[in-house]
Image (spheres, coloured by chain):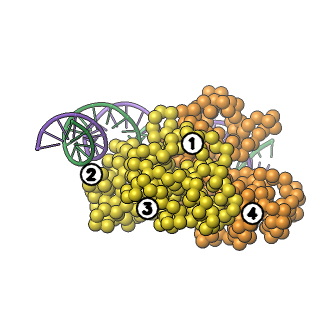
Chain colours: A orange, B yellow, C green, D purple
Amino acid sequence: MPNRGIKISCEECTTFNCFVKQASPEWLAKISQFKNQVVYPKGQYIFTEGSPVFGAYFILSGQVKVVSSVFSGKQNIVRLASDGHMVGHKGIGHETYNIGAVALQDSRICFVSNELLYDAFLNNPHFTIEVMMFYSKELRKSETRSKYFAQMTTEEKVAYAILYTYETLQDHDEDGLPCIFLSRQELAELAGTNAEQVSRSITTFKNDGLISPEGRCVKILQLKGFHQLLSPYDQFI
Amino acid sequence: MPNRGIKISCEECTTFNCFVKQASPEWLAKISQFKNQVVYPKGQYIFTEGSPVFGAYFILSGQVKVVSSVFSGKQNIVRLASDGHMVGHKGIGHETYNIGAVALQDSRICFVSNELLYDAFLNNPHFTIEVMMFYSKELRKSETRSKYFAQMTTEEKVAYAILYTYETLQDHDEDGLPCIFLSRQELAELAGTNAEQVSRSITTFKNDGLISPEGRCVKILQLKGFHQLLSPYDQFI
DNA sequence: TTTATAAACTGCATTTTCGCAGGTTTTTTT
DNA sequence: AAAAAAACCTGCGAAAATGCAGTTTATAAA
């Protein structure tokens, strides 16, 4: 992560899919001036469940998992996010977060306060519409996921989790092969099962020639195979 | 459903939580003029999976279930909606629906075309923000549901489905007691299980004095009991 | 490089869920 | 009001998922 100490302004930022880029030049400058920017190291919390909501976080670069836990202590990955995505926006009147966000790798993240954000919404219709569309799309993804959770076998859920992770984070190894970097436990928290079942499924996929697990990294050899596996469940994501 | 043949204008409409009410007087009049209004009888589809998207539907009065099916023929209830809610909005560029909407009872529903809607968004920031917040809230609910699906037992999922239905549709019997009007099959499609398991759970809840099933209608005797049952799963909805 | 620690894999018994089948009740139709 | 159809309930065997335990492999620390 270069230039750790220097704030990247919205004007010079190259994350072009960031919603803030939809704001007018004057508002872009205004947001840029008042935004706060922090580089979170891998594994660190950006915000935690129960902490008060002061604004929204925009990922300039990096990867983030949005987590939620239940009383029993079990954790659940609710969503993954990377460059240009927004996390932690709750609107006005929501005192505390019921989710937390953790950096999956060193991530540069911009914070915009609720007041500034609301002002920007009022004055930049394209920005607001873009954010609205983002929520609309995320809602559709989440509803699809609920449906899948309700009907898939454990193995299918693991396949879905692997595919979702790749489609969302778009990681590649040194040879350009698609791969993912989540632990078995994290995949389990995403798929709604446990680490043992993930291991079992991964072994099956390996034997079928779909993947090649190499330590931390799971290389995806046949994306098509995964889509085939999930073909009974209509269009993906 | 009175005045079946007469269109209720936005100005005289008493569904005050409808997002359209956030538009300026001139835009309210414009939307009112160009909107289409239909009374759908119970059980009828408002739009179906695979049909093209031309706009969005606002529920003036009634109840709607949003459904999604998989190749195997199984159906899933993705969301319930009632007065003032919006269904079927997909943004620009989404050719067809991947969900369908069915009236749970006779429902008066207003249709607004994509073009008019987008124009209204551009010129009515409060309206757009309101819709954005709606999506944000629905996303949170859906994510909570995913989490629950991943960790709850079948019985807890049924309890959750009953509570969600009541909180969303707010039905009452002639004595003012909270109750719900979904079939076992529909509750199963909402809870992510099958009708048999719903029957079993309902019997358990009856024996525990939480509910009193009377044919079509399930009376809820102890809302508190349901909240207690689900208390390990943090804040509800 | 060696050692310590954490993560991953796999077998097995237990528990949970599923889904058919058959009987009962409720609702709708005639 | 009677008949037909649909929805609902429940027992039971089959299938799936869980979670523990022990082993192996990979990663981090000394």
Relative placement, left or right, of B39 versus B196 is: right
Circle 2 is placed at which residue position?
A: B215
Name the subunit of mark 3.
Answer: B
Q: How far apart are the two marked residues, 1 and 2, measured between alpha carbons?
A: 34 Å
| Up-down relation of residue A173 to residue B128 (above or below) | above
| Up-down relation of residue B61 to residue D5 (above or below) | below
Q: Which is in the foreground here, disc 1 or disc 3?
A: 1
Residue B229 in view, yes or no:
no
Name the subunit of mark 2.
Answer: B
Same chain for the residues under marks 2 and 3 in the image? yes
Disc 1, disc 2: CB below 8 Å?
A: no
As drawn, the label of residue A124 is 4
Name the subunit of mark 1.
Answer: B
In the rendered structure, which amino acid carries the disc numbered 1?
Tyr
Image location (x, y in percent) of residue B222? 33, 65
Q: Residues within 10 Å of mark 2 (few under 14, many from 20)?
A: few
Circle 3 is placed at which residue position?
A: B167
Q: How far apart are the two marked residues, 2 and 3, measured between alpha carbons?
A: 21 Å
In the rendered structure, which amino acid carries the disc numbered 4?
Asn
Q: Earlier in the sequence, mark 1 or mark 2?
A: 1
In the rendered structure, which amino acid carries the disc numbered 3?
Glu
Residue at the spot 79% in from the left edge and 36% down from the top edge: A176
Same chain for the residues under marks 4 and 1 in the image? no
Residue at the spot 38% in from the left edge and 66% down from the top edge: B224
Q: Which is in the foreground here, disc 2 or disc 4?
A: 4
